Structure formats: structure tokens, C-alpha cells
Amino acid sequence: MQETLTESYGIYSLLPPLVAIVLAIISRNVIVSLFIGVLSGYLIIDHGILPALLDTARGILALFEKGWVVKTLIFAIFVGSIIELIQRSGGVEGFVEFLQRRKKLITTKKEAELLPFFVGLAIFIESSITSLIAGTVSRPLTDRFGTSREKLAYICDSTAAPVCTMFPLNAWGALLLGLIGSQIEAGVIQGEPLKLLGSALLFNFYAFFSILLVLYTILKGIDFPAYTRIDPPDFRLPKGRGDIYALVVPIASLLILVFVFLYITGGGNMLEGSGSTSVFAAVLGSIVISSLYYLLRGSMPPGDIVPAIFRGAKTMIPIAAILIFAFAIGDVTVKMGTGTYMAHFAHAILHPALLPAGIFLLSAVIAFSTGTSWGTFSIMMPIAITMAAGMGADTAGLTPLAIAAVVSGGVFGDHASPISDTTIISAMAAGCDLIAHVKTQLPWALLAALLSLLSFLLFGFIMA
């Protein structure tokens, strides 16, 4: 079927993802860009605007008939509930107070800089929260020991998105699991999304190098040039109601329950368990356990818990929308044979070993231009997986590498982009000028990207 569709649509099968990419770069509105990309695909298939609109609507509605799609969406939405509960219950304040009480343990500049580094590693549930907490808690200490605000912003930024992509039990993981699952559902590849993502994250080179370079600059005492400082907004949090366990209980229960449900759904073998079912059940279980803890502890008034759950869920609706349209454009590219056509084309002009490096570079350009790694994942993942799969059975090892290349490229582009929300928040939390942060961070981000590119080239030749 794929071959027939590819022969029918040929180069026109490239239009849906190209339309989505170009519009995303121009408009920076990923949802609208993905929708128009889906619609353009059905316009080519149906040769008419009305049939195309109807098929677009049918394609999106049909996604809700798939159990794994619904479970992935619920997981993504209710991760927002967990974040909201942590914030409303005093979990963030408790974590800040816990660190502030231990300020006396920090007596050197190196120790002051290690504080935001380890905060970034510890809080992997959401990149913006990571940057905000790391900068807020550490700024007084790094100021006291003479660390420039630009270096603090670099530490906060480099341990935000890179760390979040290394753990699939957050909203980042929900998006990636959904994108991989859609390709499995379409028959492009086989396997279990959670296992495949876990394999791919072993090759998430940009995250590894970014984190290692931050640690290197801290341990070697490398200073960043200090530019004009600005007075940051007051991020001080209310005192007296912090409870660190209000943060620990939701995250720990989520982690534990995922493994419990993987064991249950796998009939005693976690490797055979259902990833979508496990993360779906775990996020709901974590909400229940956390709510009971807050009630017993008195961390939140009973009447505030349910509204907080729905407020948090509401904040993730845009992410759910991105997921839906990402799944839809993935379906369209499968129907048109986009990935197969690109794989045949790439196979004719490109050695399979060079594919991961090419995917990394393209993902980086898109993410830098749009300021969003999530939108880049949504556009590039279906293309990358289908291209890797289309290279042939003897290159099956390229699939995890191609997935990792999308993730690494997306995070690098987002990390280096001056219009990325994480870049902006990191500069704001550290109290430095945005452009100064971008200028001082860019050489280190480029070094991590270069090392990543070389790694993708090396492993491409090993695994192709």
C-alpha cells in the first residue's frame, strides 16, 4: 500500500510536512500550522476543499476511537493537574525552604553554582518550573560569591529542557510517547512506545553533552562575562506553609506507579507491559494519592483540591491539541507515503549512516526558528521514523537513533533560540538581560551541538 501511495503522490507527498514547517517558522503557531498541513494533504488526496475539510474532521475524530490516543491525551492533560497541585499545596515553597535552610552548607562559589545545577536535575516535571525555581533559590547565593547572572541563566537553561527530555514521566514524555505510538499504530514500525523511547533516550546526545558542559564550567570555575544587569521580578514565595513532601509525594507516586502498572499489564514482565496504559493509570493514581495526602496533612482546603485538578488540566489543553494535530498529520503522511518517498529519495543520494545527523540538523533549524521543541517534535517525528524504517530491515537500528536525533535537535534549537519560552524564563529568573543570556550561552550550546552531531555521525555508521 505504501509503495502505491508513494508512486501516486510522489513529490506532492512532501507538501503537508513542508507546509506545516514553513507556516510554523513564519507564524510560530504550531497548532494552526499542523492543521493547515493536514488539510493540504487531504486537498491533494481529495482534489476539493469540501471533501478535504470533511476528511480532516473525520481523521481527527477517528483518533479518539483509539484507546492508546485517549490514554496518552489524558496522561498529558493530568500532568498539568499534578503540577498545579504541587504549586497550590506548598510543594514548591517547601522545596525552596528546604534548600534555603541549608544555605550554611554552601561556602564557596563552586558550591553556590552546583545548587542550581542539582535543582535542575531534581525537578524534571516541567522545564519552566525547573528554570524558575533554580534561578529563584540560587540567585542570592551566586550573587554573594560573584557568579555572573549570565552564568546562572546558562545553568538554569541547560538543566531545564535537556533534563526533562531524559525522563519520559512528564508532559515531554507524553508528547514523545504519543508521536511514537501513532507511527506504531499506523504500521510504520513495530514495538512498544515506552520501550522504544527508552532505547532512543540512550542516544539523546545533546541532553548529555549540555549537562556535562554545565558541570564542566562549574567544576573548572569558568566565568561568563557579566553584562548590564536588570532588576528581576520578585519571585520570593510565601513563607510558613511550605511542605517539601507535597512535591515529593506526587512525583514519587507517579514514578512508582508507572513501574507497578508496567508489571501488571506485562503479566509480571515490565518489559512487556503497556506504556500508554501504565502512564495513564499512574497519573490518575498519583492525583488520588496526592489528594489524600493533602487532605490528611491539611496542605490544601478540601474544597480547593478538585478545582486545582481542573485548573491544571486546563493549562495542558494546548499540549493536547498539539498532540491531536501531530497524530493527524502523521496519519496523512502515512496515507500519502511521505516517509517512504523521502526514504527512497534519501537512500538514492544519502548513505543511511548520515540520516541521523541530517535529522538532527533539520530539527535544530526548525526549533531555533520557531522557538519550540514541542512543535519540532510534532512535525519531524513522523518523518524521521518513517524515513529510518524505510531504509530497510538491515538498518533497523536507525529508528531509535532517528528518534533521538529529533529530540536532540529540537532541544538544541529551542535551547539556543532567543524566542524560546525556556530561554526567556531562565534569563528572567536569573535576573539578566535576555540577549546577554543568549550571547553567552550560545558558544556552549553550539559546542554541545557539535559534539552531538559527531556522535550521530559515529553511531550512524555503527548502526546503519
Image: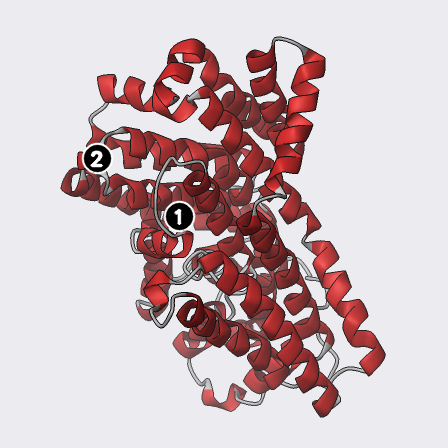
Answer above or below: position of 451 versus 341: below
On the image, the x and y values in percent for residue 461 come to 16, 38
Residue with the mark numbered 2: 393
Which residue is pictured at 60% across the width and 85% down the height? 245
Which residue is pictured at 68% across the width and 16% down the height? 51
Q: Is residue 244 visible?
A: no
217 left or right of 434 in image: left
Which residue is pictured at 39% across the width and 26% down the height? 339
On the image, the x and y values in percent for residue 370 come to 56, 35
418 left or right of 198 in image: right
Look at label 1 and name its amino acid.
Answer: Ala
Front in this rendered view, residue 34 or 266? 266
Residue with the mark numbered 1: 445
Q: Secondary structure at mark 2?
A: helix
Residue most toward the right? 303
Residue most toward the front? 267
Look at label 2 and name its amino acid.
Answer: Ala
Front in this rendered view, residue 65 or 384? 65
Q: Quadrant of the N terminus?
A: top left
Mark 2 vs mark 1: which is more N-terminal? 2
Q: Secondary structure at mark 1?
A: helix
Q: Is residue 295 visible?
A: yes
On the image, the x and y values in percent for residue 361 come to 36, 34
Q: Quadrant of the C terminus?
A: top left
Which residue is pictured at 66% across the width and 76% down the height? 288
Q: Residues within 10 Å of mark 1 (few under 14, many from 20)?
A: many
Q: Which mark is residue 364?
A: none
Front in this rendered view, residue 353 or 38? 38
